[in-house]
Amino acid sequence: MHTDSDLLTPDTLANHGYIPRNGIATIGQIQAGTQALFNMGADLSALLAVGGAIDGGDIISTKMSIGGPDARVGVLNGALNSVLGTPSGIAGHGKFNEGDASATRLDFYLEGDDITFHPELFKQLHQQAIAKGNGTYSVDAVKEHFKNRYAASKAANKQFYFNLPSAGVVMGAYYFIPGFFSNGTIGAGGIANEASITSFYGAKPKRAGAWDDPSLEYTHVPERIPEQGWYRRATPMTIAEAVAGILDVYLYAKPALGGSGADQSWVVGPVDLPNNPQALGCFLYNAVYANFPSELFNSVALLETVVNFLSSTLVPGYKALGCQINFPDTSGTGATRYDQWAKTYVGEAKTKAVGSGWYKKE
């Protein structure tokens, strides 16, 4: 099974049995798998898994596909599919865990395929490892690769979409390359070397012993945990570290947030993105809530079920960051109030940019 995501290569988790091999996983299974293999902190795994379930799965059963749409997953066992459509899976375009400018996948608009690994894109990443990382896939190397990928995607893609919260996840995925795939803890002796990164990505060099050649080409093989010499980070990566990494990538490349409008204009996302890790972390939490489909706010009973679940899962980490608890009230909340909330935290690009999974044709 292949997914679009550079986000901890879910294929690797499935291939090694850290999540079900059939590609259908619950929030709890994803949390347990990412903690066991990569030492992802419970707060970070909760945010990413819940965000994926809201946008691409069945939030009630907490199931989602790690790839594209799958008939085995349906919102309320299909009861709301006529309203919300079949869950897209975490590869669903323009939602929480998937966005344009991926490190090794093409944008969905370009070929209708944001799942397939592209060796040429990995080659570009490898070139930055040589140029910026002294042969390692360092933070400096992945930041430069992101800057280049963003520019190339925005230029080629007429439905380019790069808005929160998925834009934050995309930038986080770049930081996760050295953050999770290094031998050990990045910043504490961990090194994102060629053997480790190529194994996790399933990028097989066509020539052995040529890692220092920028013209080196790759083929794709199944993603695997490195067979020898790899050990996971010693300390869990929490939201605080992940958001600091996202901010580092963002401030280096300074990408415009938003998406391409139907008339080829640029629809801006939130323009007041915080520039410090604590505030950005709180902002991303709010963006998860702002990414509810507004149809849910027409059913108070359903909304209470969803919000109660989210609160029990997310609020502990939210409070740990010192965020103000100001989620929309489930009692009497209507679509108008929700729309005001969504505009603040994800911007009009959510519904007015054609690349968005929530685009509404006027």
Image: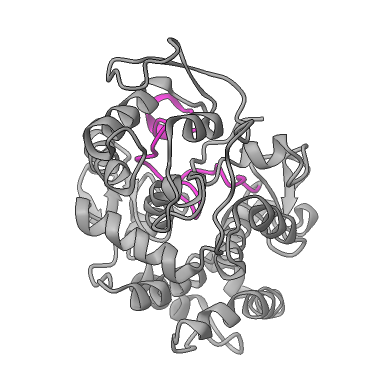
Side (left or right) of 240 relative to 254: right
Residue shown at 75% from the left, 40% from the top = 71
Give the quadrant of the N terminus. top right
**Of 291 and 31, the residue lying toward us:** 31
Residue shown at 69% from the left, 54% from the top = 36
Magenta stretch: helix, strand or loop mostly: loop
Q: Give the image quarter of residue 271.
A: bottom left
> Can residue 41 be seen in the rendering of this structure?
yes
Residue shown at 37% from the left, 52% from the top = 171
In the displayed structure, 140 sits above or below 225; it is: below
**Of 349 and 190, the residue lying toward us:** 190
In the displayed structure, 73 sits above or below 215; it is: below
Side (left or right) of 293 relative to 66: left
Q: Give the image quarter of residue 205.
A: top left
Structure colour scheme: one colour
In the displayed structure, 154 sits above or below 1; it is: below
Please report the bounds of the magenta region as a residue range.
Answer: 87-115
Residue that extends furthest to the top in the rendered view of this protein: 207
